[in-house]
Image (cartoon, rainbow, N blue to C red):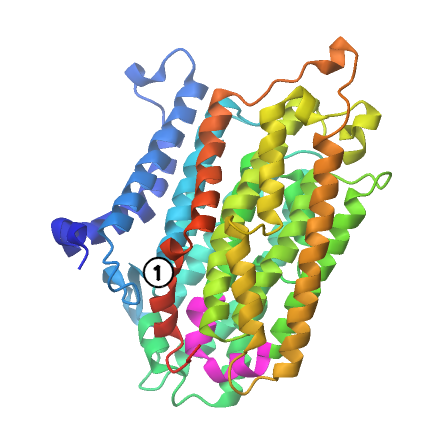
Amino acid sequence: MNPVNGLLGDTVLQLLLLAVVALPLLGAVAALLPAPPGLRGRDPGQAVLRHGVTVTGAVLAAALLLLLGFDHDRPGTMQATTDVGWIPALDVRLHFGVDGVSLPLVVLTALLSFLCALYSCHRMPAGPRPAAFVALLLVLESGTLATFAALDLMVFFLAFETVLIPMYFLIARWGGGGREAAARKFVLFTLLGSVVMLLGLLLLGLTAPGGPTFDMTVLAANRGRGVSHSVQLLAALAIGIGLAVKTPMWPLHSWLPDAHTAAPTVGSVLLAGVLLKMGTYGLVRIVLPMAPDGIHTLAPYLGAFAVTGIVYGSLACLFLARRGNGGDLKRLIAYSSVGHMGFVLLGIATLTRAGVNGALFANIAHGLITGLLFFLVGGIRERTGTTDLDRLSPDAGGAALYGRAPRLGGLLAFGAVASLGLPGLAGFWGEMLALLGSYHPADGLSRPAYLVFMAVAAFGTLLTAAYLLVVVRRVCMGRPPTSGATLALADVRAHEFAAWLPLVVLTVLAGLWPALLLGLTEPAVQTLLPGVSR
């Protein structure tokens, strides 16, 4: 047993997890209340931004203590569990806990939320008063953390839906051009998907052997026994569609580029780094163990959509990266997420331990790397006033970051090579394991079909390298402008280093020592996929 776990005790771990989920919500309420006279300071707006840093910092500290106290000898077992009755008539319970699948996502969410609050404290996006901004950021964090910790289907659904409201307002009130249309499109797509998902969740809970239950641990342990194949298929299809919208899976992705392009920097970081993970997490946590026969039937179709998304996202990025096409750097990174999340879906579609572990690893890697890239693009926009690639190119008197802001250019190049899956960085292992799972899919799946999926996905990695190298060449390389007015470009500032450096360090650490993450996920995946040998 982990000695820290013995020191803290089960009760302390329970309280830590409850604090992780509840503190942001309490902090959001406090942000909207008038500050006591002694805490207002000369600038109330800056005071509430510091409040956001304090609350998210406390949540991150609690998440790290939870990680340290977690029994790493039993990552396949739910720990720090709390189970309290909430709605007796429906047997809905406030049931929370973490295992090796959910704990890394909890820590990632706490980390990115803190870094976003820290960044916003020094670079608040233009918009309404800071108190509303901080409150929405904290509600978003609370809903996301509750989604990853929930062990009741209805609580999972409510937490899953909670994040829509703050993200809508973050885009619509603090975003850029076209923000209101992008926010409406985001909510419309995700709400329609959620309605379908709710039907699937109800179907799983109401048809459970032994009577209706929404307890996710009970349903997962049951492994679909006593539930007909047709019911499992309908449930997996309905839940899968709702989760695929949030992932996003091609062709349900069209809300994503608009939302990312219009969102403020921290909105894009949280949308890509955390919210997209809710969809793939739901597939692993709910669909795989609770409707195994249904997902086995749907897996080849999921794999086909996944590799289509990989190639489609890469081709869209290549188009945007070409000179004269008016490509937007923020939009390009949004489309790259469609391709990267395609690898996550492909790993899940293999129904193998290797593939699912790869999907979980790629989830974390994408959150770190794409979060860093959106931070960097926000910094470039702040300095140059644009993210248009044609205007950023040196031949248009644009960025030439290596010559004008070498640290910023170096970080962008680092993010690009990490995103293309360079060995030794975090982006490599998830994609490799997903491809390995495709080489030997689960029993009963067509191996020739999955070999085709593997080949197409591998081709997608070449396309990814192509467009990212084009971006680095166009934005970072070239001769700096000779005019003094256009030559000046601030390099990375202290608060930016503070917000970006942890993502760089974790990207390198996860790439060089993947066992840190796989040691948590592998036993948990064995529990979710019993009887799967590879």
Q: Total marks drawn?
A: 1
Relative image position of residue 477 (x, y in whole percent): 73, 30
Magenta highlight: main SS: helix
Residue at image location 49% in from the left, 38% down from the top? 504
Relative image position of residue 91 (x, y in whole percent): 30, 71
Instruction: Determine crowd level at label 1: few under 14, some 14-19, many 20+ residues with C-alpha closer than 10 A.
Output: some
Residue 498: image quadrant is: top left
Image check: 148 left or right of 410?
Answer: left
The residue that disc 1 covers is: 519
Image check: 51 left or right of 241?
Answer: left
Q: Which part of the image, by quadrant, shows the C terminus? A: bottom left
Q: Residue 411, can we see it?
A: yes
In this rendering, the answer to whether 248 lies above or below 196 is above
Q: Residue 165, can we see it?
A: no
The magenta segment is: 283-299
Image check: 47 left or right of 504?
Answer: left
Q: Is residue 445 magenta?
A: no
Relative image position of residue 365 (x, y in whole percent): 50, 51
In this rendering, the answer to whether 453 lies above or below 514 is below
Q: Which part of the image, by quadrant, shows the N terminus? A: bottom left
Residue at image location 68% in from the left, 26% down from the top? 401
Judge by depth and name the residue closer to the eye, 221 or 6. Answer: 6
- Tell me the amino acid under the disc marked 1: Gly
Q: Is residue 288 magenta?
A: yes
Q: Secondary structure at mark 1?
A: helix
Residue at image location 74% in from the left, 36% down from the top? 473
Residue at image location 40% in from the left, 65% down from the top? 154
Relative image position of residue 387 (x, y in whole percent): 71, 33
